[in-house]
């Protein structure tokens, strides 16, 4: 067995990452700061990952959001070694997103460039003292929500992350929509509500992205969260590519 109970067969329950139209995904990220990857995990993989939340094994910490003013609900950070599907998503998605991340940095005039592989990027994180894994499993019940926030865990930040909905809207829960907001200079903030089905992933900007304006490229700040759950239970897998201090 690998990780916390999902063996190598778990990789077969991930959609072919090469099968997505990454040019279209990049265009949507440029335009809106987020893009959906339909059917990234199979329903079976979603159920298996959700069931692990009840265990203690395999996680490095548990956070009750209400204790910290983060919202209501809770989440757990995975420990290394990550479950096979989580590791496969992290290493498989990164090379598809790194070219866009580099292009964004170039447009913003930032010098940092991201290497081709996730292993190389993690080595840079670890050199900077960011050694704790950041993929997480979130659990919401009735009345729970996640305040708008940014997942920044140190100086080394990869500017894109992925959330995968593990529960089925309408069957497992109601409410609990994924929300992303964009704060534009000298303008009112814009909100985007992303509709997801079980197994769908959403790629989105971690903290800022470039936007073209009449006076050139400018930086907009983004935050993401989850609206109030009305009924049921909702689980989400979070894939963050940088590690934490």
Image (cartoon, rainbow, N blue to C red):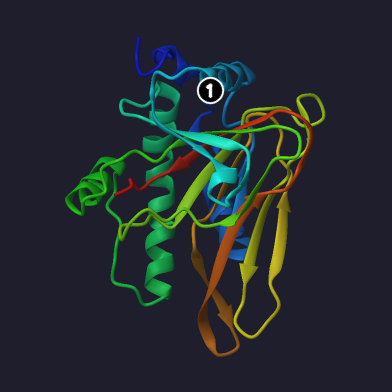
Residue 26, quarter of the rendered image: bottom right
Establish if 31 lies above or below 227. Answer: below
Question: On the picture, is 131 further left or further right than 142?
Answer: left
Residue in the foreground of this view, choosing between 193 and 15: 193
Question: On the picture, is 227 further left or further right than 106?
Answer: right
Residue in the foreground of this view, choosing between 171 and 233: 233
Establish if 5 lies above or below 79. Answer: above
Reading the image, the residue beneath label 1 is 53
Residue in the foreground of this view, choosing between 177 and 37: 177
Residue 115 drawn at (x, y percent): 27, 52
Residue 122 drawn at (x, y percent): 26, 45
Q: Residue furthest left?
A: 127
Residue lying at 55% horizontally and 45% vertically, measured from the top left: 67
Residue lying at 63% horizontally and 67% vertically, measured from the top left: 182
Residue lying at 55% horizontally and 90% vertically, measured from the top left: 215
Residue 165 drawn at (x, y percent): 63, 34
Establish if 231 lies above or below 34. Answer: above
Question: On the picture, is 122 further left or further right than 35?
Answer: left
Q: Is residue 21 visible?
A: no
How dense is the environment of label 1, judged by Cα within 10 Å: few (below 14), some, or many (20 and up)?
some
Residue 103 drawn at (x, y percent): 41, 65
Residue 21, quarter of the rendered image: top right
Residue lying at 59% horizontally and 52% vertically, measured from the top left: 24
Residue 191, quarter of the rendered image: bottom right
Q: Count the marks.
A: 1
């Amino acid at each position: 067995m690998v990780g916390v109970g999902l063996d190598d067969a778990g990789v077969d329950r991930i959609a072919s990452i090469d099968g997505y139209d990454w040019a279209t995904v990049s265009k949507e990220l440029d335009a809106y700061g987020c893009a959906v990857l339909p059917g990234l995990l199979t329903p079976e993989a979603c159920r298996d990952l959700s069931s692990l939340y009840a265990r203690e094994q395999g996680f490095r910490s548990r956070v009750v959001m209400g204790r910290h003013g983060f919202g209501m609900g809770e989440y757990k950070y995975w420990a290394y070694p990550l479950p096979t599907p989580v590791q496969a998503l992290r290493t498989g998605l990164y090379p598809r997103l790194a070219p866009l991340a580099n292009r964004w940095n170039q447009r913003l005039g930032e010098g940092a460039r991201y290497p081709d592989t996730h292993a190389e990027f993690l080595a840079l994180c670890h050199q900077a003292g960011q050694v704790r894994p950041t993929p997480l499993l979130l659990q919401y019940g009735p009345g729970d929500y996640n305040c708008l926030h940014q997942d920044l865990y140190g100086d080394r930040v990869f500017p894109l992350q992925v959330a995968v909905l593990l529960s089925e809207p309408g069957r497992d829960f109601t409410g609990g929509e994924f929300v992303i907001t964009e704060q534009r200079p000298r303008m009112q903030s814009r909100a985007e509500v992303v509709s997801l089905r079980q197994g769908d992933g959403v790629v989105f900007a971690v903290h800022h992205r470039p936007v073209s304006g009449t006076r050139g490229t400018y930086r907009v700040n983004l935050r993401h969260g989850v609206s109030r759950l009305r009924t049921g239970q909702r689980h989400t897998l979070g894939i963050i590519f940088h590690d934490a201090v």
